[in-house]
Image: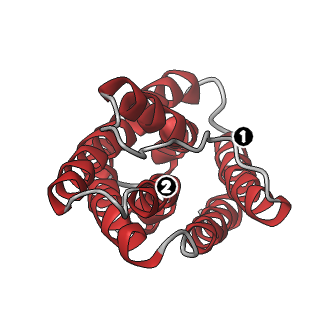
Amino acid sequence: MIEVVLLAIALAMDAFAVSIGMGAKSQKQSQQYARHLAIYAALYFGIAQGVMPLIGYLLGAALLGWLAAAAPWIGGIILIALGGKMLYEVLSGEDDEEDIDVGGSVISHRTMFTLAIATSIDAMAAGFTLNLLALNAWLACLIIAVVTAVFGWLGVYLGRRSGTWLEDKAEVLGGVVLIAIGIKVMFFG
């Protein structure tokens, strides 16, 4: 179960970093605006992060019979690659998510949906590895959704208070945890 919580935290870091950015950019807005933004971040990011690994799990379950012998290696490589991608983006200064301007207007549902999907694509790939862990995948996806919702909500408030300096640190933590879980899946079952 600890693996699921660590996986959930690692997968939530993209959404957390985006939420921090949204919170930082909304510092001049009202407290009510921040409250709404935090609720939307929690809902959109949490739901997307819960559904995407489920899709990956179901696709992985369909393919697992064909790839049973190689599944731990494939799952481990996927997690290590996702973690490496997160670390690369932080260290190189590149980011595949667009900055959004929340400056005098409320973020649209379309923008929130787009951000939620963009930050949860990695979770779909990581969902494949749920087939390799001895746990209930539905419960795992629920845990991932709840953890991401909490991080999305907190991220808005942290960004509002601290600015954007936490964004990169969250991404680094997520990348390192994904790499560690990938190594465990590959070598330690």
Residue at image location 79% in from the left, 59% down from the top: 93
Q: Is residue 20 visible?
A: yes
Q: Is residue 124 visible?
A: no
- Residue 127's x, y, as percent? 48, 41
Q: Nearer the viewer, residue 22 or 59?
A: 22
Residue at image location 27% in from the left, 60% down from the top: 153
CA distance separating discs 1 and 2: 23 Å
> How would you rate the neighbour count of disc 1 (Cα within 10 Å): few for under 14, some for 14-19, many for 20 or more?
few
Residue at image location 68% in from the left, 50% down from the top: 82
Amino acid type, callout 2: Leu
Tag 2 or tag 1, which sits nearer the N-term? 2
Identify the mark at residue 86; answer none if there is no mark: none
Q: Secondary structure at mark 2?
A: helix
| Residue named by callout 1 | 70
Identify the mark at residue 11; answer none if there is no mark: 2
- Residue 154's x, y, as percent? 30, 67
Q: Secondary structure at mark 1?
A: loop
Q: Nearer the viewer, residue 172 or 124?
A: 172
- Residue 149's place in the image compared with 56, above or below, is below
- Return the residue found at the far left: 32
Amino acid type, callout 1: Ala
